[in-house]
Image (cartoon, helix red, strand yellow):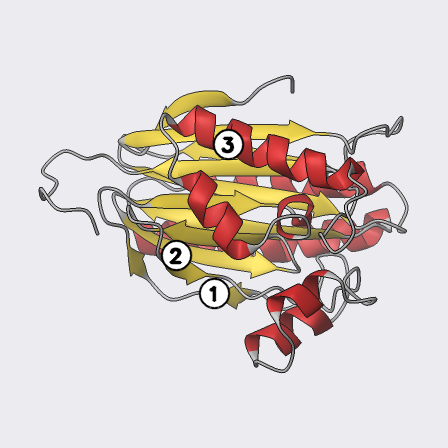
């Protein structure tokens, strides 16, 4: 994509961007889907084909298509929809194993302003409040992600760790597990960011949170993408920089009936 695109979704707005790694000639192994199930409900998902495994782009496409086929059977019932997300990921795991590939996935169920996360691997999400506070984020299924979450290494150490590329859990393996996050209600000025590791391996969490506040939403996604791409090709000592495919989906809920103050 040359630039992000914006769509009405679940009563709010979503913006999406996906592009190959700078200088890469082979296919983009990332992908995203935005699925409107009713006027106020939706599912968004980002998948990233595992590098080093065959047919990475086919694996991520297969995962997203299988998930979409299941989710489209649901309507406004959040419990049915969330059960179908799990069923879709299970079906995708079997199909991806037959393909011989692997993919990560971060899927978000949206019901008005209520969200719940389903993820496998190191594609991840974050909810940022209107004043830049990180309210919720998923923990990547990786050795470095767990070390950082436990406080055993700093974020700077995590960004430069020699095992940053390792992932402990992917769709396409027999031991695949689905992590289901807590139910979370977004405030009117919150922004949800869902992205492949092309974002999280190149920008610090506070940098993502700061750029997520930009208005309009497409500008926030555009600046996130530009900042990550610049890091991928920069040579500044001490700054993170990991060339990779990049996919970002951002969502803001409807502000109808919002309080005057920002959360």
Q: Which residue lies furthest to the front in this view?
A: 237
- Residue 192 in picture, x, y percent from top left: 41, 45
Of helix, strand and loop, which one carries label 3?
helix
The residue beneath circle 1 is 180
The residue beneath circle 2 is 116
| Residue at 83% across, 66% down | 162
Q: Is residue 119 left or right of residue 127?
A: right
**Which class describes the residues within 10 Å of circle 2: few (<14), some (14-19), or many (20+)?**
some
Q: Is residue 24 left or right of residue 19?
A: right
Q: What is the C-alpha distance between the residues marked 1 and 3?
A: 25 Å
| Residue at 45% across, 25% down | 218
Viewer-nearest of discs 2 and 3: 3
Mark closest to the chain's N terminus, 2 or 3? 2
Q: In this view, does 168 lie to the left or right of 162?
A: left
Q: Residue 221 carries which label?
A: 3
| Residue at 65% across, 77% down | 153
């Amino acid at each position: 994509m040359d630039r992000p695109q914006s769509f009405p979704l679940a009563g709010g707005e979503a913006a999406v961007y996906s592009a190959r790694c700078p200088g890469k000639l082979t296919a983009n192994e990332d992908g995203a889907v935005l699925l409107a199930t009713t006027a106020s409900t939706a599912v968004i998902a980002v998948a990233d084909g595992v590098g080093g495994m065959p047919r990475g782009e086919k694996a991520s496409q297969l995962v997203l298509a299988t998930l979409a086929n299941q989710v489209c059977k649901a309507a406004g019932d959040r419990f049915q929809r969330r059960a179908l997300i799990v069923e879709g990921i299970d079906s995708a795991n079997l199909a991806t194993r037959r393909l011989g590939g692997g993919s990560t996935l971060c899927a978000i169920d949206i019901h008005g302003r209520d969200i719940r996360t389903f993820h496998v691997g190191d594609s991840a999400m974050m909810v940022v409040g209107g004043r830049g506070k990180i309210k919720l984020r998923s923990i990547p299924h990786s050795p470095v992600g767990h070390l950082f979450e436990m406080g055993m290494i700093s974020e700077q150490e995590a960004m430069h760790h020699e095992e940053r590329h390792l992932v402990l859990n992917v769709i396409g393996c027999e031991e695949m597990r689905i992590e289901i996050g807590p139910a979370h209600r977004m405030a009117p000025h919150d922004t949800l960011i869902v992205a492949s590791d092309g974002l999280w391996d190149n920008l610090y969490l506070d940098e993502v949170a700061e750029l997520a506040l930009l208005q309009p939403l497409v500008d926030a996604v555009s600046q996130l993408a530009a900042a990550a791409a610049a890091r991928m090709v920069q040579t500044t000592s001490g700054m993170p920089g990991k060339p990779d495919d990049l996919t970002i989906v951002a969502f803001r809920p409807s502000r109808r009936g919002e309080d005057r103050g920002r959360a």
